[in-house]
């Protein structure tokens, strides 16, 4: 076998692989002898099948396997022998082959560019943070106080009305038979809270303490308990007491009832909860700031195939005609697809090129920083991410877990963002990070992706 370089232009490499007829024949003979020693065929004892019969039966298959193995070996020699770090899957094409003659093939590939990692200790990154708005904290505190107003028995007997808290016992029946989960004693229910089946709370309005009434309701068609969905039920309800809500109080007593030491502790928890709602957006802005800082580093060539793939993705998102083209192609598979940037003007195409180049460069740079610093995604990382994903689909967790177990590609896709986040965290540990206070308008303003310099 002979492997020789035929092209070296930028990040493109091509090699000629020549496998002699003798090498192929030797490998075929070796494989046929192995088969002959064990093959079972009607009319022959194992290991006694004539070689002529073995060749007639298995020669084509064995030759195909031998050629594939030889090409794989040739590709390995080309890649490892030249210390190539591939940026994409290599392409092997057979140029010529006839029985009894040498096989000639070509291997084309793209290699990783030379990437200069910046001195991360000198990279400056702004890390946004939000101080909770006192007005938002007070509004939330007022809502909590209203929801937790204490109640007291009504001073003078009267009929129940919306807003009252009814102390009730009830038994629910369908076709005269009590059903599981439809019975309770001493239950506290705020009338008008819509916490029960539609119609139940309204049915109690007008009743007086000490009376027993029948309240008919129909369970919703989409009720979570399938055996009750759409069924008509009659609840026998005894109204024991009526309570009224007292005025809302915002004080230490409210805080202690909710499990806090004092009112300041409750306010602090509210502020922390409000800030927590912004953590995902704050993280995304911090990540963008890191990428913007990295984009200012030394430029390098990008592999053509990676650029093409990213450019098509960007152009498709920018080009409203692309969606129409994709829809048309779903119904017409016999015609060539027009370019995804068809109809875009030169400025739009230039913008798409700039964005695609930036994304590819940053992706490769992130990968290189991770490689140089031995940052890896562990099995525990991916397992945790898969379980988090499964939790997003209540009732279907097992199906989601099985999907990932059976699809290695899906596991790789979920590992990508984990790796990127780990590298971003590493950069933040090394970089000069400045905490910058911003407001929510700034945080949620639509960011524009910057083009590389």
Image: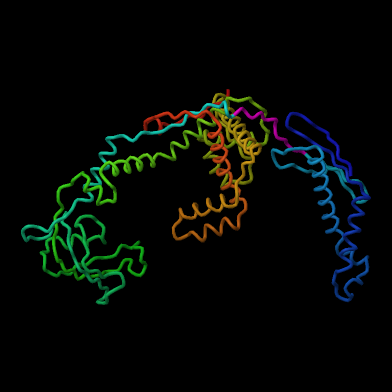
Vertical comparison of 54 with 269: above or below:
below
Q: In the figure, is residue 374 to the left or right of 316? A: right
Vertical comparison of 287 with 179: above or below:
above
What is the residue that sits farthest to the front in this orientation?
A: 261
Is residue 32 highlighted in magenta? no
Q: Which residues are magenta?
A: 108-119
At a point 66% along the width and 31% down the height, the residue shown is: 302
Q: In the figure, is residue 388 to the left or right of 416? A: left
Quadrant of the drawing holding the C terminus: top right
Q: In the figure, is residue 250 to the left or right of 283? A: left
What is the residue that sits farthest to the top in this orientation?
A: 453
Vertical comparison of 226 with 275: above or below:
below
What is the residue that sits farthest to the left in this orientation?
A: 156
* x then y, percent, for residue 351: 55, 27
- Residue nearest the observer in this picture, 102 or 417: 417
At a point 37% along the width and 39% down the height, the residue shown is: 275
Vertical comparison of 144 with 360: above or below:
below
Place residue 187 in its image quadrant.
bottom left
The reply to whether residue 134 is visible in this rendering is yes
- Total labels: the figure holds 0
* x then y, percent, for residue 179: 29, 73
Name the dominant secondary structure of the magenta segment: loop
- Residue nearest the observer in this picture, 292 or 437: 437
Quadrant of the drawing holding the N terminus: top right
The reply to whether residue 55 is visible in this rendering is no
* x then y, percent, for residue 390: 49, 55
At a point 58% along the width and 35% down the height, the residue shown is: 340
The figure's colour scheme reads rainbow
Place residue 431 in its image quadrant.
top right
* x then y, percent, for residue 87: 69, 38
């Amino acid at each position: 076998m002979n492997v020789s370089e035929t092209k070296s232009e930028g990040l493109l490499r091509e090699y000629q692989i020549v496998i002699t007829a003798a090498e192929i024949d030797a490998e075929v003979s070796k494989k046929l002898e192995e088969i002959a020693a064990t093959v079972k065929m009607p009319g022959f004892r194992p290991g006694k099948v004539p070689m002529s019969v073995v060749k007639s039966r298995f020669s084509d298959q064995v030759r195909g396997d031998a050629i594939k193995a030889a090409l794989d070996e040739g590709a390995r020699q080309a890649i490892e022998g030249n210390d190539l770090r591939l940026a994409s899957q290599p392409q092997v094409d057979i140029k010529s082959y006839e029985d009894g003659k040498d096989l000639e093939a070509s291997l084309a590939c793209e290699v990783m560019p030379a990437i200069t990692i910046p001195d991360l200790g000198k990279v400056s990154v702004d890390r946004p943070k939000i101080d909770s708005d006192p007005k938002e904290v007070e509004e939330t505190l007022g809502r909590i106080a209203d929801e937790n107003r204490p109640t007291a028995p009504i001073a003078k007997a009267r009929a129940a009305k919306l807003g009252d808290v009814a102390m009730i016992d009830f038994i629910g029946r369908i076709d005269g038979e009590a059903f599981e989960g439809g019975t309770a004693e001493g239950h506290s229910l705020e009338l008008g809270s819509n916490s029960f089946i539609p119609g139940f709370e309204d049915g109690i309005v007008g009743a007086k303490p000490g009376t027993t009434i029948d309240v008919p309701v129909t369970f919703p068609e989409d009720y979570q308990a399938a055996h009750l969905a759409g069924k008509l039920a009659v609840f026998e309800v005894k109204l024991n007491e009526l309570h009224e809500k007292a005025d809302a109080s915002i004080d230490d007593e409210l805080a202690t009832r909710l499990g806090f030491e004092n009112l300041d502790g409750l306010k602090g928890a509210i502020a922390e909860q409000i800030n927590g709602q912004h953590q995902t957006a704050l993280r995304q802005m911090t990540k963008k700031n890191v990428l913007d800082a990295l984009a200012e580093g030394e430029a390098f060539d990008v592999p053509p195939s990676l650029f093409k793939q990213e450019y098509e993705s960007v152009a498709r998102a920018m080009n409203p005609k692309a969606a129409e083209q994709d829809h048309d192609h779903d119904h017409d598979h016999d015609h060539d697809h027009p370019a995804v940037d068809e109809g875009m003007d030169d400025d739009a195409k230039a913008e798409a090129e700039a964005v695609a180049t930036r994304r590819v460069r940053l992706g490769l740079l992130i990968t290189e920083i991770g490689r140089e610093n031995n940052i890896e995604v562990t099995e525990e990382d991916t397992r945790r991410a898969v379980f988090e994903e499964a939790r997003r689909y209540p009732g279907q967790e097992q199906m989601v877990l099985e999907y990932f177990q059976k699809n290695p590609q899906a596991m790789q896709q979920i590992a990508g963002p984990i790796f990127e986040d780990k590298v971003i965290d590493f950069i933040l540990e090394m970089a000069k990070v400045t905490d910058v206070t911003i407001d929510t308008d700034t945080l949620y303003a639509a960011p524009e992706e910057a083009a590389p310099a």
